[in-house]
Amino acid sequence: MSKLLVTLGFASSNSEARRSVTQGAVKINETKLLDPNDRVQIQSGDIVQAGKRKFAKIVVG
C-alpha cells in the first residue's frame, strides 16, 4: 500500500506512507486502512483518499 501512495504522489517516502496508514489517514472506497502491511487488491474505479484533500480514482487499462 505504501508504494501506491508514493506512486500517486500522496507521500514522499514509504515511511511517510506507512505512518499515514497507521494514523488512519488513508481510505479506499470509504474503507479506512489501519495496517500498513496489508495487501490490498486495487481495481479500476477504486477511489484512494489520503488525508482530507488528496483523492485519486484508479483507472486500469
Image (tube, grey):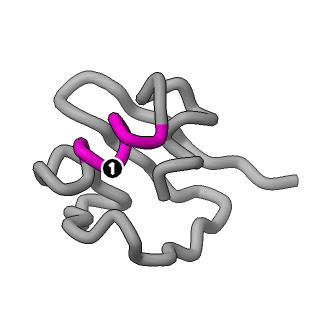
Residue shown at 47% from the left, 31% from the top: 13
Q: Is residue 46 left or right of residue 7?
A: left
Q: Say how many tags the image has.
A: 1
How dense is the environment of label 1, judged by Cα within 10 Å: few (below 14), some, or many (20 and up)?
many
Residue shown at 34% from the left, 35% from the top: 16
Is 9 within the magenta? no
- Quarter of the rendering containing residue 22: bottom left
Return the residue found at the far left. 23
* Residue 20 position in % (x across, y down): 24, 43
Return the residue found at the far front. 15
* Residue 29 position in % (x across, y down): 35, 60
- Quarter of the rendering containing residue 42: bottom right
Depth order, front residue of 29/8 = 8
Residue under pointer 1? 18
Task: Characterize the magenta stretch by its predominant secondary structure.
Answer: helix
Is 16 within the magenta? yes
Give the residues drawn in magenta, as a range. 14-20
Residue shown at 26% from the left, 70% from the top: 35
* Secondary element at image label 1: helix
Residue shown at 46% from the left, 23% from the top: 12
Q: Is residue 22 above or below residue 49?
A: below
At label 1, the amino acid type is Arg
Q: Is residue 12 left or right of residue 18?
A: right
Depth order, front residue of 34/28 = 34
Q: Is residue 4 left or right of residue 10?
A: right
* Residue 11 position in % (x across, y down): 42, 28
